[in-house]
Image (cartoon, coloured by chain):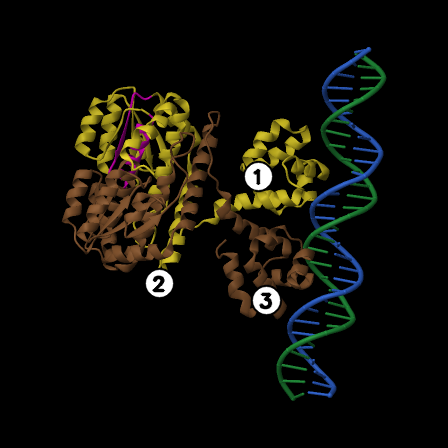
Chain colours: A brown, B yellow, C blue, D green
Amino acid sequence: MSTKLLRKIKNTIPELRKSEKIVAEYILKDPKSIITLKTADASSLMGISEPTLIRFCKAMGFTGYQELKINLSQQLAADDYFEIYEIYPDDSIHDLCEKVFDTAVSEILNVRSQIDQDILEQAIQALAKARRVEFYAFGGSAPVAMDGQHKFFRLKIPTSCISDPHIQFMSANSLSKNDVVVAISQSGTTTAIVDSVKTVRESGAKVIGIMPGNTPLADICDLSLTINVGSNDRLTMPLTSRLAYTAVIDVLTMGVAQLRPEAQDHLYNIADSQRSLKIDS
Amino acid sequence: MSTKLLRKIKNTIPELRKSEKIVAEYILKDPKSIITLKTADASSLMGISEPTLIRFCKAMGFTGYQELKINLSQQLAADDYFEIYEIYPDDSIHDLCEKVFDTAVSEILNVRSQIDQDILEQAIQALAKARRVEFYAFGGSAPVAMDGQHKFFRLKIPTSCISDPHIQFMSANSLSKNDVVVAISQSGTTTAIVDSVKTVRESGAKVIGIMPGNTPLADICDLSLTINVGSNDRLTMPLTSRLAYTAVIDVLTMGVAQLRPEAQDHLYNIADSQRSLKIDS
DNA sequence: CCCTAAATGGATGTATCTTACATATTAGAC
DNA sequence: GTCTAATATGTAAGATACATCCATTTAGGG
């Protein structure tokens, strides 16, 4: 499936006949309803005839209504299909594997739909202009921060990852207006990170937070990318929420890379420079 | 639909009539073919009658064949729907966000289909029996290793994460038969990790590797969970491959948790013990 | 304003799915 | 082992939904 059907429909509208346009607009407006409708019902709902509906399907490149319906249902299903699962003691390894991956996908998609595009944009702008980017995190969020640091390092941006509250405090006091701190917390309530962020803000540096909404940390950051995922405090649930956090970092990284073309050369060079560390193959 | 259709079919088999079992087994064997088949063709291919096929659909909770077909097509499509995208300079932030998340999902699903279930099972068995679990990794894989260490820590298993080749060497020499090392490398060719793994194997400890297939590292581990994802050496591609690695660690963790019931109590206790570090809300 | 060509819908045919019912099979009781 | 009753399965008819044909309508050009 190379192009997405809905986009294709939208692009094809100008070439369609008048009554076919009605079909196109109806499908774009409420694509999900089509899946359960038959030609007769669909056409009468749209106020056109069955042949017109069929003609529209053919104009879109399908053999008929049936094929369009299946195609549409496939595309719409994708996002809703993945679920968060609990693991049960008698699950086989195979089930377990399926469930963990499904949950991971589900949470990533879930987060994608939650992200505030405006804040994301502002965060990327701030990071792209930053003289220095520091990642603060504790516990389970520390690997996420470390990942962020690693990625920004590749973009040739001075960066560090700090999981020690004392060092965070020292770092916070040494920052200035042009610096950015990315504070990551899967709880949003950790006392130490809230304290660190307060100190950072006194320095004038900008703080981007990645944490659940309605938390003490979310309240005090300049830009809060709030993310609500299933809690991890039950053993029976996969610990996939940090995947979603990592994905957000990835978006930030790619956004910054786009705004800083000089980073691109550097990235290519890294591949070369790493060669000496590797075995020839 | 609450549970995944194919899994549900599998679980329902014992309750089905003999000829309906034939249907179930056929669908499980080749689910994709159903999408394009009509009742007549499908039933004759399966060697049963159309009504039996319909009865099977109803037994699965659908109103008929049509509904099952659409449902099946949705579920099968979901996996193939996500794609790996390249980022272009003129992409909007929104496009970028969509692409990064899509790519992430695509790679996670891709990895899921690659995982060797036998090796996975053996790896989980080995980890569950381990006296001690050490994670070795460098560079971009270090956050993944750190994540693994964090997760196993929660399972009350003595664990550490080592990204320093010297310490790895010292660690490797101190391990014994009952210990397990998890070596993570997104290249599979890093000289230092290959050397460390060789040292570990001399100690008699077991090495589980997570890396691309056909690499020097894959050749020397006891259990190689090989994973092939799109390369990350281009700036225009999201850096999502480590998400897939983290997901694999997650599967290992959940598998071990399942085999070590004593870990469960501990996990619940952690939530309590962390309370003192948090702000009341 | 008429003519032509295109667009649209009604009616019909056909493919596909579903149901009713008859037959076969199986399980249990004697 | 055999009969009976219940269950399972398939045949064939019926209903439904989809696609096609062709007549009617509409729009545009002369």
Q: Which mark is residue A230?
A: none
The residue under label 3 is A21
Q: Is residue B129 above or below residue A32?
A: above
The residue under label 1 is B30
Q: Is residue B109 left or right of residue A30?
A: left
Q: Which mark is residue B90?
A: 2
Category of crowding for the residue at label 3, using alpha-carbon neighbours closer than 10 angstroms: few (below 14), some (14–19), many (at least 20): some
Q: Quadrant of residue A62?
A: bottom right
Q: Secondary structure at mark 3?
A: helix
Give the residue displayed 53% in from the left and 37% down from the top.
B4
Q: Is residue A1 visible?
A: yes
Question: What segment is highlighted magenta in the picture?
Answer: B130-155
Q: Are marks 1 and 2 in contact (CB under 8 Å)?
A: no
The answer to if B148 sits in the magenta stretch is yes
- Subunit that carries the residue with mark 3: A
| Amino acid at the residue labelled 2 | Asp
Q: Secondary structure at mark 2?
A: loop
Distance from Cα at disc 3 to Cα at disc 2: 30 Å
Q: Are marks 3 and 1 in contact (CB under 8 Å)?
A: no
Give the residue displayed 37% in from the left and 30% down from the top.
B253
Q: Is residue A190 above or below residue B260?
A: below
